[in-house]
Image: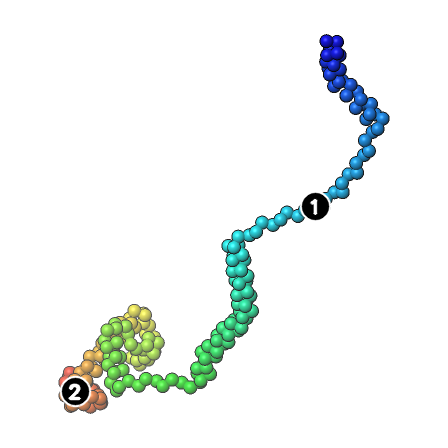
């Protein structure tokens, strides 16, 4: 029994002894310092593989760039062609102006059309046909032969001119009738004399 108790005591004290023994051994024999391992070089991150769609888009972008660069190189030639076309068109437009010295052929109307046009124009109008200044001088000349120092208002001269033109128009209308009766187109002095005789105005 004594042996077994001693064994149990040794077994109970054995962990404490072992710890003390290990501490004394460490104090007597300290551990040698281990060299630090050299720093490992920085590792580059491995690039992720791009999908096939990205590679296709890059290829298409490069192709587009090459096409645009070719077009930009060809652009000046196209612009020069446009300028040449505009220059030629301007020259072609200016070509007739060089021959502008030659007058265009005047249109010749058939005989009688211009006369009929003038007749219709004057028949529609109501304005005076004789110029005012020459008619006024004639009136003053005739009146001075009758009496000196006569003065006329402008309205009086206008009334005389209106009456004179009405008389001349009626006389020429009768003269035209006499010309048509003679189966002619152009009036003659004898037609005027006949119209005056028929009207009872002999001079």
Q: Residue at x 70, y 45 (%)?
A: 42
Decide: is 40 above or below 101: above
Colour setting: rainbow
List x then y, in percent, for residue 8.
Answer: 72, 13
Q: Secondary structure at mark 2?
A: helix
| Residue assigned mark 2 | 180
Q: Secondary structure at mark 1?
A: loop
Instruction: Identify the residue at the far right of this view.
Output: 28
Taking 137 as reference, is 16 left or right?
right
Query: Callout 2 environment at 10 Å: few (<14), some (14 to 19), or many (20+)?
Result: some
Q: Quadrant of residue 103?
A: bottom left
Q: Residue at x 46, y 83 (%)?
A: 98
Distance between the Cα atoms at labels 1 and 2? 129 Å
Decide: is 194 above or below 159: below
Q: Quadrant of residue 24?
A: top right
Taking 109 as reference, is 37 left or right?
right
Q: Where's the C terminus, which quadrant? A: bottom left
List x then y, in percent, for residue 63.
Answer: 53, 63
Decide: is 198 above or below 81: below
Q: Is residue 196 visible?
A: no
Q: Which mark is residue 81?
A: none
Q: Residue at x 50, y 74 (%)?
A: 81
Q: Where's the N terminus, which quadrant? A: top right
Seen from the viewer's position, the closer of residues 155 and 127 is 127
Q: Quadrant of residue 151?
A: bottom left
Seen from the viewer's position, the closer of residues 25 and 124 is 25
Q: Which mark is residue 42?
A: 1
Does label 1 or label 2 sit earlier along the sequence?
1
Taking 107 as reference, is 52 left or right?
right
List x then y, in percent, for residue 32.
Answer: 82, 33
């Amino acid at each position: 029994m004594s042996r077994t108790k001693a064994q149990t005591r040794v077994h109970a004290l054995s962990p404490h002894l072992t710890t003390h023994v290990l501490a004394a051994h460490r104090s007597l024999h300290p551990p040698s310092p281990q060299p630090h391992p050299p720093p490992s070089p920085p590792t580059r991150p491995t690039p992720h593989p791009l999908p096939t769609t990205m590679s296709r888009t890059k290829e298409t972008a490069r192709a587009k760039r090459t096409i645009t660069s070719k077009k930009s190189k060809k652009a000046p030639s196209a612009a020069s062609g446009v300028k040449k076309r505009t220059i030629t068109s301007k020259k072609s437009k200016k070509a007739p102006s060089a021959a502008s010295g030659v007058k265009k052929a005047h249109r010749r109307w058939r005989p009688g059309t211009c006369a009929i046009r003038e007749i219709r124009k004057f028949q529609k109008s109501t304005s005076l046909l004789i110029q005012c200044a020459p008619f006024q001088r004639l009136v003053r000349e005739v009146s001075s032969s009758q009496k000196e120092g006569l003065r006329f208002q402008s309205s009086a001269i206008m009334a005389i001119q209106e009456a004179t033109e009405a008389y001349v128009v009626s006389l020429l209308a009768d003269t035209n009738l006499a010309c048509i009766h003679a189966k002619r187109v152009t009036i003659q002095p004898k037609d005027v004399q006949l119209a005056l005789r028929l009207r009872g105005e002999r001079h």
